[in-house]
Amino acid sequence: MRSAGFLLPLALGASGAILYEGATIISFNENDERVSILDDASMLIDGDTIAALSEGTIDSGIPGNTTRVNATGKIISPGFIDTHTHLWQTAFKTIGSNTSLADYFQKFGEYGQSASVFTPEDLYLGQLAGSLERVHVGTTTVLDHAHASWSREGTDSCINGSADSGVRTVYAHAIHEVAGAWSWDEQISKLQSLTKDDRFHADNGLLTLGLAYDRFFDAPASNLSTLWNITKGANLSVVTTHHLGGPWGFTNSPTALHSHGWLNDTIPVVFSHSSFLNYKDAQLLRETNQYISTTPESEFHFGHNHPHANRIQDQASLGVDCHFTYSSSMVNQARMWLQNLRAGRYLNTLEKWEVPTNSPMSVEQAFYLITRAGALSLRRPDLGTIQVGSKADFVVYSTDSPNMLGWSDPVAAIILHADVGDIEDVIVNGAYVKRAGKLLYSNYASLRSRLTASAKRIQKVWAETEWPALEGSLQNGEGAPYGPTEIIDTLRGNGTGY
């Protein structure tokens, strides 16, 4: 469980204000919703807020205890925003490397054997490690679809893991019916208690409460009414739901939620994936200003795919989903999504026997999806940009590595050339959580040891489990029939190399 050492998780921040000088800063202009590049610029952080921003030097209004940082040659970017993930799953790292989504549901999802195998200690360690992984890659805000909510103790462990990490977390507590776990009434009681929980009302505002729910398409009206009364009454930060559609089912669509009156409100709703979004759903998103979260690598890896999601990028943000299977870097997600959308549009032109003359998507658009768009999906305009008055959540990139030499466009440098090793500092809410390339979490060695032991025990259980063949149809008829996928052959001659 949470130890005394973990209650003091980070050397959070400097002793006063921070002044970065001489940097290239990726700022933002709200008038045209475009980035604004400031060269040889200075940025003053006072408390949790960006207090001043200017090309050249800042000469006035600097507090006496300010720490000056020479950032000459460095790039300062807004912190990245991940709008869909499951932080608790760290202990599965690498064992889902060749997993389809149908296989994921029985092995790694919320309805499988995890509820009976994971202890509260396992959940705490996984949640904390998953959160620190986000800090490491420059993510400063994460929307956690927290579906390891099988008990009071496990829920509290996950919340503590997020609270101890230093990353800004919208903790969307999942309400779901899991065999052998707690009842609907017990879950509602816990959700009500969380709305008054001091962890979600701390002065730093880093941890806020949301709701995750995946049965809008078939839940009794009384259940939805209960959830809405809590959501609205407590002014929860967000509602999030998995929406796939098409062969998958999972029709928690904008149309379904709108029919229950959940979209026309001040509370944001984030639809995760929306792979087979239809025209009516897309129009509803625009009319009600709600967003989807595309998780590019996840949707490639597991096979959700995204044939229609690419048509609603004006109401889209990006997420990671399952960090135990691939990279948790939002820059990697943006890079992959950028090149995928480019490839599709190029092919459309080529299929008409024409030669493309222009690139269909810019690096700035990809950058927007993991910064400003993520903030707008959460209705947090104070996040995702570097402006005076914004929260001081940002990332400092070194440009000394061979892959960064010769850069002139800072956005292109980050989206297409930078890697995690180029990240020097990560600041959340005006406090350092990573400094000079090192996480500032003070008990990392202990966490590493305990998480490794936890993962080894859990992965042994999974390796010894006899998993049933996938037969019939997905989710007992909610989705289409199962079918085999063609195996790629990488070996000359006999065998495939799979």
Image (cartoon, rainbow, N blue to C red):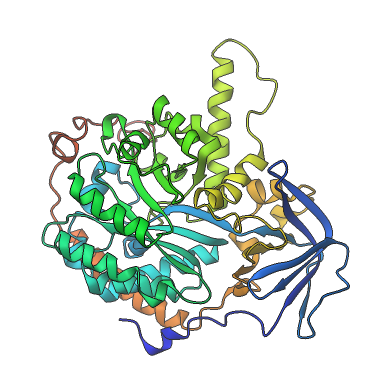
In the image, is residue 350 above or below residue 154?
above
Residue visible at 48% across and 81% down in the picture: 9
The answer to which of 484 and 227 lies nearer the viewer is 227
Residue 47 x %, y %: 66, 76
Residue visible at 41% across and 56% down in the picture: 323
Residue 50 x %, y %: 70, 66
Residue 41 occupies quadrant: bottom right
Q: Point out the residue furthest to the top here.
A: 353
Quadrant placement of the N terminus: bottom left
In the image, is residue 1 above or below residue 477?
below
Taking the image as drawn, is residue 93 in sight? no
Is 243 positioned to the left or the right of 366 in the image? left
Residue visible at 30% across and 56% down in the picture: 229
The answer to which of 90 and 175 lies nearer the viewer is 175
The answer to which of 362 and 215 lies nearer the viewer is 215
Residue visible at 55% across and 21% down in the picture: 347
Residue 291 x %, y %: 47, 42
Residue 341 occupies quadrant: top right
* Count of residue discs: 0
In the image, is residue 141 above or below residue 68?
above
